[in-house]
Image (cartoon, rainbow, N blue to C red):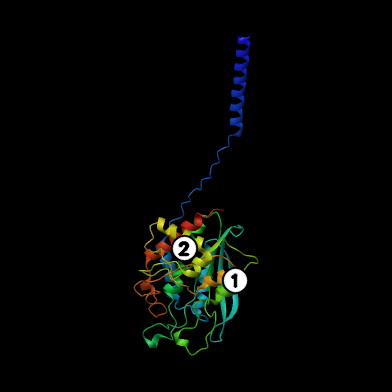
Amino acid sequence: MKKELLYVVCCTLYLASCTNTKTAEETKQPEVKTPEIKHITPPDFNADSAYVYVEAQAKMGPREPGSKAHEQAVNYFEKKFKEYGAEVIIQKATVTSFDQKKWLSKNIIASFNPLSTSRVMLSAHWDSRPFCDRDSNTANQKKACPGVNDGASGAGVLIEVARELAKQKPGIGIDIMLWDMEDYGQGSVESNAPPLEDDWALGSQYWSQNMHKPGYTARFGILLDMVGAKGTVFPKEEFSVFYASQTVNKIWSTASNLGYSNYFENKQIGKITDDHVYVNKFASIPTVDIIGYSPDAGGFFRYHHCLKDDMSNIDKNTLKAVGQTLLEVIYNEQP
């Protein structure tokens, strides 16, 4: 009897042991692995090439509205972007400046990988200011500005980006917008004119309310303004932080990882009225303004809206810092 009882107990314990082991195996949760995001090495931004594109615009002379240089620049941009494989649209519009003059505005829109529904927008203004109202020489204040750092530098960087996109296709769609009529706002020279609201950035204002393609959207936008001068730094602008804080953080951390934290300063400045304001406000595309500041000048670069805004200000190292950061960001944007 004792042997039989011992046998039953042993079998019971054995079965219980088997049952518990099986239950544990059945209830064990599978290990969830986080997919690894592969880093994409972007092309090397060629600052020498970007410099040539800036210089080509400078040689045309001031590209103020209504001038021969203005029309020449439109043809130049269209040719370059098509050369690099973009789908190009010239968006024309009649806009009215603060002095009640009407102008034919031309935004240049170059699209890469146009069928992709995941898109990023890069932009800069390309026009020149019709008056050097901040020039210390009063004789120059009604002359048109060369607009080399203030206009041509951003466009030059984006043409070089286009050249790189042609060589190595990114996983997303890229739209490059060159805004017209950004710099025809009221300044000190026109102080007798009645003040107008939103008298700057007329080209981007028009596009933001009349998009080149119905329903167009982008994940985010990056605007370049005055990105070529030596000694320039890029603090975080307040409108950019308000509308697009995630993209601001992405750009500035990327620049830091690339060793450009001496250009992209981790500090915030106040609100600046620029093209990105209207893209954020009307088009609802979170857009960041990478805009150059000069600590020595206590604001924008020394020759902002002056006759001396010429090629002597352009520094290849500054162009490189901005261009390489842009490429790193867009090539590592997941499809």
Q: Position of residue 5 (x, y in %)?
A: 62, 13
Q: Which mark is residue 282?
A: 1
**Residue under the point 42% across and 72% down:** 149
The answer to whether residue 311 is left or right of residue 40 is: left
**Residue under the point 42% across and 74% down:** 148
Tell me the amino acid under the disc marked 2.
Glu
The residues tagged by marks 2 and 1 sit, at their Cα atoms, a distance apart of 29 Å
Quadrant housing residue 316: bottom left
Viewport quadrant of the N terminus: top right
Q: Which residue is mark 2?
A: 160
What secondary structure is found at the residue carrying circle 1?
helix
Q: Nearer the viewer, mark 2 or mark 1?
A: 1
Quadrant housing residue 18: top right
Q: Position of residue 178 (x, y in %)?
A: 52, 70
For mark 1, does the 10 Å Cα neighbourhood hold few (<14), some (14 to 19), or many (20 or more) residues? some
**Upstream in sequence: badge 2 or badge 1:** 2
Vertical side of 313 occupied by 262: above or below: above
Nearer to the camera, 201 or 53: 201
Quadrant housing residue 196: bottom right
The answer to whether residue 173 is left or right of residue 129 is: right
**Residue under the point 46% across and 63% down:** 160
Q: Position of residue 317 (x, y in %)?
A: 37, 63
Nearer to the camera, 323 or 283: 283
Q: Is residue 162 visible?
A: no
Q: Which residue appears farthest toward the front when viewing the image? A: 1
Vertical side of 196 occupied by 243: above or below: above
Q: Position of residue 284 (x, y in %)?
A: 59, 67
